[in-house]
Image: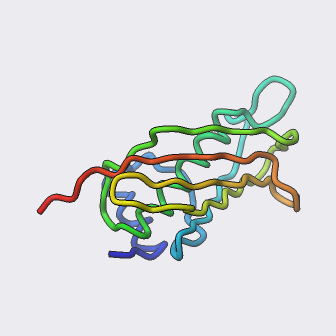
Amino acid sequence: MTMTANELQQYLQEIFPQFGYRIVSAGDNAAVLEQGTDTSHLRPGGTVSGPTLMAIADAAMYIAILAQIGKVALAVTTNLNINFYRKPTPGKLRAEARILKLGQRLAVGDVLLFCDGEKESVAHVAITYSIPPRQA
């Protein structure tokens, strides 16, 4: 069962009300999320913190997966590896997730992270999710 970006945003309001990202698009084994940053997202030196980048990447992959498999709230991250390329500047973050392999129990994908106005990504994330068995 596939879900649209609007359906996913509504579903997350029910099961995960602290989800603070805007779903720009979802479907076709991909998702794009956006998030504004403020001083709470910055580390010393005025750059967006690593945990902020990891969180939006994780959320983007979660949305990409749910868009394909439907309402499976308990799909969980089993591995996340991030490579930081350049200093992320404050402003709007964009996470572009794509699923590379979607199996019955595991999903593998990657996420590119961008800062507002930048053409080149600031980080790359490789991520694996565990998908719980379907209930009959």
Q: Decide: is 109 above or below 67.
A: above
Residue at the spot 87% in from the left edge and 26% down from the top edge: 45
What residue is at 53 percent from the left and 55 percent from the top? 61
Q: Is 84 placed left or right of 104 in the picture?
A: right
Q: Residue furthest top?
A: 44
Say how the picture is coloured: rainbow
| Residue 97 lies in quadrant | bottom right
In this rendered view, identify the residue nearer to me: 87 or 102: 102
Q: Nearer the viewer, residue 109 or 62?
A: 109
User: To which quarter of the image does residue 88 belong?
Assistant: top right
Residue at position x 33%, y 59% in the image = 104
Q: Point out residue 76 in the picture as x, y percentages from the top left corner.
A: 39, 44
Q: Position of residue 111 (x, y in %)?
A: 65, 54
Quadrant of the frame with the C terminus: bottom left
Q: Position of residue 5 (x, y in %)?
A: 49, 72
Quadrant assignment for the N terminus: bottom left
